[in-house]
Amino acid sequence: MANPIKGEVALVVGGATYTIKLGRNALASVEGLLGKGFPEIAKSLSSEPQIIVLRAILWAGLQRHHPEIDLFGAGDLMDEAGDDLITEKVGEALRITFLEAKGENRPQRPGRRGTGA
């Protein structure tokens, strides 16, 4: 189960739930795969996202919890889920990752507020 507090996003495709986590290892994998730094990759996402970029980010984000999924498997998930859902979930995972890197708010664990006992 995806935990947004840990920077994870759930992707439900064909009745199965996958967990996307775009930590530093995943981002480094994307850079290595595409041969570009992440600022350049992010810039390309702000226009019309290329399939190769979305597939690379999805694949890298799945590796923490689903290492058995290769690039072709990530492409198959994209085919089954559709472009809108993949773009939404990859975007959500990127937002969580970069909010964390900036030290900004990301989803917080519900807790008690008060001064204590």
Image (cartoon, grey):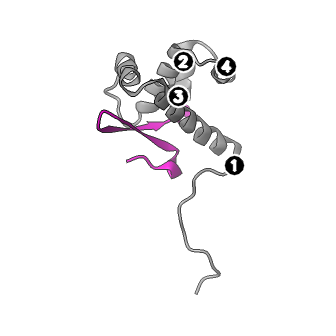
Q: Which residue is mark 3?
A: 87
Residue 104: assigned label: 1
Q: Three-letter amino acid code at disc 4?
A: Ser
Tell me where the magenta segment starts and ends, as one range: 1-25
Ranked by sequence position, the earlier of labels 4 and 2 is 4
Residue 98 placement (x, y as % from top left): 64, 38
Measuring 54% from the left and 37% from the top, which residue is drawn there?
93
Q: Three-letter amino acid code at disc 2?
A: Val
Q: Do tag 4 and tag 2 residues touch (Cβ < 8 Å)?
A: no
- On screen, residue 25 above or below 36: below
Residue 68 placement (x, y as % from top left): 31, 27
Secondary structure category for the residue under label 1 = loop
The CA distance from mark 3 to mark 4 is: 12 Å
Assess disc 1: are there few (<14), some (14-19) or many (≥20) residues with their C-alpha within 10 Å of its C-alpha: few
- On screen, residue 17 above or below 104: above
Assess disc 4: are there few (<14), some (14-19) or many (≥20) residues with their C-alpha within 10 Å of its C-alpha: few
The CA distance from mark 3 to mark 2 is: 11 Å
Residue 49 quadrant: top right
Residue 7 placement (x, y as % from top left): 52, 44
Q: Which residue is mark 2?
A: 53
Secondary structure category for the residue under label 4 = loop
Residue 47: assigned label: 4
Residue 14 is one of the magenta-drawn residues = yes
Secondary structure category for the residue under label 2 = helix
Secondary structure category for the residue under label 3 = helix
Measuring 37% from the left and 48% from the top, which residue is drawn there?
1
Measuring 67% from the left and 23% from the top, which residue is drawn there?
46
